[in-house]
Image (cartoon, rainbow, N blue to C red):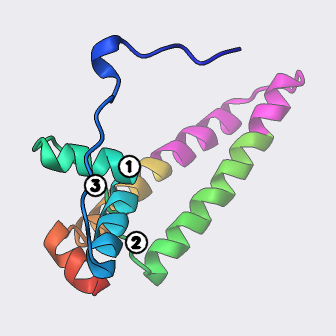
Amino acid sequence: MARPRKEKELNHYHFVSVRLSDIELENVDKAATTAGLSRSEYIRRTLLNQEISVKYEIVADMQELQKLVGEIGKIGSNLNQIAKHFNSGGSRSMAMEDEIRECISQLFKWRREIMRLAGDYHGSVETHKKQKR
């Protein structure tokens, strides 16, 4: 199946040639890659003062956070086993329902704790840029 044609005003018919040094080209390519754009689209947006959004993912390597993530994975596995039990016609009991409610409240408590821990690591884009150099 053929790709649909662009509207006439969206086609780029005109060619503009620019000379860049190796370093300038490398900087443009890095910026375009970081923004998730092609080189041409990045240059086009820069020239036309259009917004270029870049998302940075900051990862915190903390033992407490890793432990919480591991525990949540185990709970997810347990919840899958419980769902399988109920979906295959397993019997329900008040004790089991109380235990499920307790596990869910524990999950919410851990979620709040993770958000609290992650909140300490909010930084600015400038800080992230400085760390990469």
Task: Tell me if mark 2 has few (under 14), some (14-19) or many (20+) residues whose alpha carbon lies within 10 angstroms of its own.
Answer: few
Residue 120: which numbered mark, if any? none
Amino acid type, callout 1: Leu
Q: Secondary structure at mark 3?
A: loop
Quadrant placement of the C terminus: bottom left
Residue at numbered disc 3: 54
Tell me: 35 left or right of 107.
left
Q: Residue at 35% x, 74% y: name it.
A: 26
Q: Is residue 53 visible?
A: no
Q: Is residue 34 magenta?
A: no
Amino acid type, callout 3: Val
- Vertical placement of residue 70 versus 47, above or below: below
Are the residues tagged 1 and 3 within 8 Å (C-beta)?
Answer: no
Q: Residue at 83% x, 33% y: name it.
A: 84
Q: Nearer the viewer, mark 2 or mark 3?
A: 3
* Quadrant of the image occupied by residue 61: bottom left
Q: Which residues are magenta?
A: 82-105
